[in-house]
Amino acid sequence: MPSIISAMSAAQIAALTTAQMHSLSTADVQALSTEQVANLNSDQLGAISASAIVTLSTAAVAALTSSQAVGLGTDDIAALKTSQLAALDLGNLTSTQVGALSSTQMATLSSAQTATLSTAEIAALGTAQIAALPTAGLKAMGSNQLQALGTAGIAVLKTSQIAALDLNKLSSSQVGAFSAAQVTALTTAQAVSLSTAEINALSSAQASALSTGALKALGSDQLQALSTDNVAALKTSQIAALDVTSLKSSQVGAFTTAQVGALNTTQVTALSTAEIDALTTAQASALS
């Protein structure tokens, strides 16, 4: 029958009923030309079994319009081969269809494909799908797209994915959702790009996870955005990396005695009179 299918005109193919389309074998579907597939409506396309859909040529898949693509069932979407998925315009799919993509399929998406995802489609993604997004794809996303991931979506990203993000595109609440491991993974360039609102949204656990390189790179406004609780939570190795002249007196006054003891000679001599006045007797006695 494949030879008969390939010999049919586009008009004849378009006249096939959904029952006839469903009865097509994998060989029959594979025999369909791009021109013939282009004449199918969404109902006809949806009638093709998932086992047969995977035999459509990449050219035929690439030529599908939005009005045709809506006919693909979630089982059809989940069955698509990597080559077919790469040819598919995700902008033609519904949120439900995008939500049917497996994590394995998500990992193969190109930057161009992730850039076409709507905020509704992104919001429909499960955590396993989000965790599978390629780093290049995350880099290609705009602010609205990244913010559509929500805090739950951000929380499941791997450290390699976090390192690929443009933090300026995230909301403060999303930055506040970072795990300690994710905060540690931030590059120096990412730390520098943090807004004062994003830094202020950090918890003490997150602040204590910042790398010494990141702390060294922060500007005065950024450092002063750290709450006194966050300053008090910093490890002694982090304290040794701070530019104390960029801190407020109240922040220096929040140092624990262990943190004061971790200050090096250069840091101690750089303390302003206001910062020294902010120290308690116990803190002052801890100065090395």
Image (cartoon, rainbow, N blue to C red):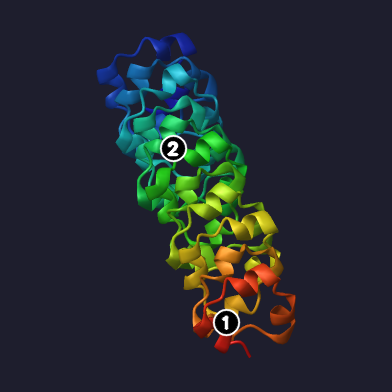
Amino acid type, callout 2:
Ile
Query: Which residue is at a point 60% across and 65% down the rendered structure image?
Result: 249
Q: Residue 275 carries which label?
A: none
Q: Where is residue 239 in the image (x, y as percent from the top left)?
A: 60, 76
Quarter of the N terminus within the rendering: top left
Residue corresponding to mark 1: 260
- For the residue pair 155 and 102, the one nearer the viewer reads as 155
10 Å crowding of disc 1: few (<14), some (14-19), many (20+): many
Query: Quick one: SS at disc 2?
Result: helix
- Residue 270 sits above or below residue 105 on the image: below
Left/right of residue 66 with respect to residue 264 in the rendered view = left
- Residue 256 sits above or below residue 198 on the image: below
Q: Where is residue 230 in the image (x, y as percent from the top left)?
A: 49, 65
Query: Which residue is at a point 42% across and 54% down the rendered structure image?
Result: 177
Residue sticking out furthest to the left: 19
Query: Which residue is at a point 54% across and 68% down the rendered structure image?
Result: 184
Q: Which mark is residue 122?
A: 2
* Residue 87 image-quadrant placement: top right
Left/right of residue 272 with respect to residue 202 in the rendered view = right
Q: Position of residue 282 (x, y in %)?
A: 50, 84
Quarter of the C terminus within the rendering: bottom right
Query: Quick one: SS at disc 1?
Result: helix
Does residue 72 appear anywhere in the picture? yes
Query: Which residue is at a point 55% across and 47% down the rendered structure image?
Result: 197
How far apart, in angstroms, are the residues tagged by discs 2 and 1?
47 Å
Does residue 26 appear anywhere in the picture? no
10 Å crowding of disc 2: few (<14), some (14-19), many (20+): many
